[in-house]
Image: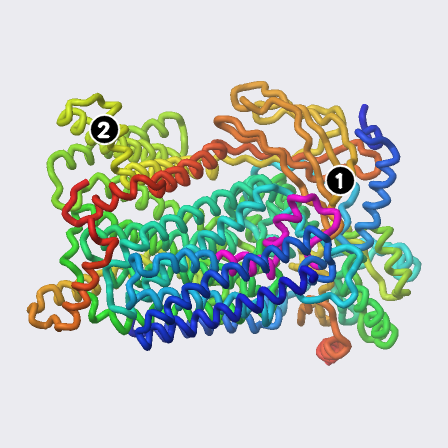
Amino acid sequence: MRGWGTGDRGVGLLARFLALGLWLWALSLAQPTPNTPPPDFSPRVFEIAGELRCPVCQGESAAESNAGIAVEMRRIIAEQLAQGKTEAEIRQFFVERYGDWILYEPPARGLTLWVWLSPLIGLGLLGYGLWRYLARVRARVQAPIADVSEEEIARLEAELQTPERKS
Amino acid sequence: MTPGLLGGVSLLAALIFSVMGLVLSILAYTLRDGRYLEVARRLSTLSLMAALVSFGALEWAILTNDFSVSYVANHSSANNPLWVKLVTPWAALEGSILLWAMLQTAYTWLLSLRVGQGLDIWRAPVALGTLFAVQVFFFAVMVFVAHPFDAVPNPPPDGRGTNPLLQNHWMMAVHPVLMYLGFVGLSVPFAYAVAAMVAKRFQSWIFETRWWTLVAWGFLTAAIFTGKWWSYEILGWGGYWAWDPVENASIIPWLLATAFLHTAQVQERKGLFKGWNFAFITLTFAATVFGTFLTRSGVIQSVHAFASGPVGAWFLLFLLGVMAVGLGLLARVSAEIREAGEVRWRSREGALLAGALFFGTFAFVVVLGTLWPLVVEIVSGAKVSVGAPFFNQISIPLGIFMLLLMGIGPVLPWRHTNAQVMRNLTAMLIALGVGTLLGFGLGLTLGVSLAIGLFAYNLTAIWLMVAQGVRERARSLGISWGQALLELAASHKRRFGSHIVHFGIALAALTIAFSQTYRVTEQKTLQVGETWQTRGMEVRLLSISAKEESNRFAAIAPIEVRSTSLEGWGSDGRYQTRLNFYPQMGSPLATPVVKYSLYNDYYFVLMQFDQERGQWATLKIIVTPMVWWLWVSGLIIVLGTLYILWPGGARVVSRQMSPTAGD
Amino acid sequence: MLRFWPIWVLLLGGLFYWGMQRPNPNELKSVLVGKPAPSFSLPLLEPYRAQYGPEMGIGEGLDKPVLLNIWASWCIPCRTEAPLLERFHQQYKDQVLILGVNVQDKEAEALKFVQQYGLTFPSVYDGRGRIGIEYGYYGVPETFVIDRNGTVLARHAGELSEAQLKGYLRQVLQ
């Protein structure tokens, strides 16, 4: 069996690695990884964790992050799944402790209802703007040609002379 | 002369040249004097040279490990491999602004070459002045708040090192440069638009900026795809798009630029939609600044954010300035803009406008979703998150509408619909139905089935358009179909290029549907020698070992994978899964090993290992279908864009451009 | 709508300005405030067992208010906070219980930390940080102020200053 120290560069390297590894931890005061294996996780665990926010991270989900707290969250999810809890119940567990903030999918109520409506709002606003714009254009197109000032005609003619416009 | 001194001096010179260029442009405009304009033109060359020298000085300082330069001391290390050193200038805040500013001077210089040819004396000073103003901003930010060449009084023996996430993949050398080329490129159409509004020449800028916009769009697209690739191969979570605020910040300008690209065609052909195009290009350029602001102000949490600092406030002012200039000018002249007619909805212009409407809506949704947590906090004090599950769901209906319109648009003629068009549309709808049913028949989900249907629908549309054109030409000229196809493709570059791009988009949509729906993640701890049967694979952990590299330490756990059924097809091989330990980072960084195949992607990540006896390792396996095709689709889109831009066809296209010419 | 462009620009500017001037953009309010503190009982770190027994925690019927401090040996702010907590413990130990919860840590490292700062207030060991999640923590150090009835009065995220600690004590001793 190949294990520690029988890697490509021998025992000396292992010792150095461990020594340097410890130095690294000491220097950066990093969160240590415990030397016990984490539990095995089914795809379901990652699916649920992907919808929860990792509390200590800068915008990563609990499925992506390797921070200790995210690992623990995955473990909690796995345990609760094993107890037969539904996804909604598991999410509720975290909401009770962290509030709606923990959900990457904002609830469709209250202030966050508006994001769910945003496609309709956006389409409505842009559509209304377009409608108004076209109505104005129509009015202007129908306006008598006498309204066009001398200056404007001069400008339009100058623009027609632009080199790129010539075929 | 030290690199620090050279860099500082050239930075100051670039700022002074930019200020002078701005002043002279203003003088040229107000006094209507071509001599000032001529000097301003020359100044753009000088500022480009100064920026190049400054950037070169930064590279020099990094390559020679000159830790008396603050940027090098903070973001580089003597142990970094050469390629990491070469890309270090854009690995952190100050250097990225320098790269940005340098690219801006290059674009300004390119624009200055157009003065006199296309850019007339009324508009040239305004366009040039706008870009000089942008330059002034970037150089002022560097000189006053984010100076890359600040002197370090007691230079340390070694620097603090480069962000490990950026050192882990060569893609990081490419992605930021492409992104900035795209972002900065959009400043040129914006400058033209400002000039058009000031000089009240509302039509011709659209012809002149066509290539500029497409070039910027191409870079932006390439940047987004390389970013996805980087994210997929580095971040170790098996996805390529997390809807992180910073990713959103890159997609917003892309969506708006795409909308603009399409409505610009309506203006080009029909002289319609002039006012909206001004608004679209203003918002597009503002969105690029918005993205920069988000990444550099710390206003919203993100994985990709640079360290925040005083730069945020500067970028905010710049963002508001850009919007104020664009929208303010538009509000002033909008009453004078005359359209060349009315919109007919059941024609190509109608489909293009509807498409732009959806792109605009999508951009609105992304902006609102990204900013909403801030709005909720200001209104109620509560914190909420709007993330990937939300955006993924909301982009499904929007995506469907956009794919439907993408098929219809090019099929509809500019004028009236005829019987041929109706037959084509019927064929496309049949393809949509058959494709969707096929998906259902294979037992796929509704979304994925629909994606197959939409792919078939778009493929049919492209096929019909190309085939009918080729048939007509072959018949009327009496030439073979192959020759007719080649001739058409050469003479209608824009149209054929857009077919290629649209095909790429349809393929990308299909791969996104598959990969997002059927991604599976699993994790298991294996003893050395143990075998794990999963997803049609047999995974065996061979050993665990340590390795020292110049800039990091690595723990390596080689595994052997054998496929045992069709599900695991293409996974066979030996892979070195590894955890990299960087001195400047608290926790180890997992570098996934990715095995692409024509259908599934196999993704192996070493999560944890027995540090004491080396007897076990925890592996995460992610299986995702069709990701390889996503990269292919990105390549197709970029190649299609290149095809349109490739010189040689320009003459033909300019003939096409006249409003009377048909397709 | 275009006519009102200055309003849109100013609204956006105002939103971002507000977002940037927040002293701590990452701050997250606790949903536990005003609610009963989750109960738990965890093994004490070895040095405290003689005095306090094998386990400690929050449960029914507290005999005095509790300051629950979540810490870890690798956390830098915890290093400046520890001596402060120790001083307050010496001063107020009859009126209030300062209870440490060591999370996401190795026990040996935690013991070293305790020894280095001579901490006499009890700390329990929660290697994986399960209790931290029960309390909805999002980093270390974090301090929960719990009154005699077991209700959470406040949560402080990050390092405590002396004035803040005094303020919380006053609040809990009323």
| Colour theme | rainbow
Q: Chain ID for label 1?
A: B
Q: Is residue B528 left or right of residue C134?
A: right
Residue B479 versus residue B105 in the image, above or below:
above
Q: Residues within 10 Å of mark 1 (few under 14, many from 20)?
A: few
Q: Earlier in the sequence, mark 2 or mark 1?
A: 2
Q: Is residue B473 left or right of residue B406?
A: left
In this view, the residue farthest toward the front is B35
Residue B351 versus residue B497 in the image, above or below:
below
**Residue depicted at x 53% and y 47%:** B175
Element class at badge 1: strand
- Residue B644 visible at all: yes
Main SS class of the magenta portion in the image: helix
Q: Chain ID for label 2?
A: B
**Residue depicted at x 61% and y 42%:** B169
Answer whether labels 2 and 1 touch (C-beta < 8 Å). no
Q: Residues within 10 Å of mark 2 (few under 14, many from 20)?
A: some
Reading the image, the residue beneath label 2 is B467
Reading the image, the residue beneath label 1 is B549
Specify start and end residues of the magenta stretch as a single range: B74-103
Q: Position of residue C160 (x, y in %)?
A: 74, 71
Between marks 2 and 1, how big is the CA–CA gap? 56 Å
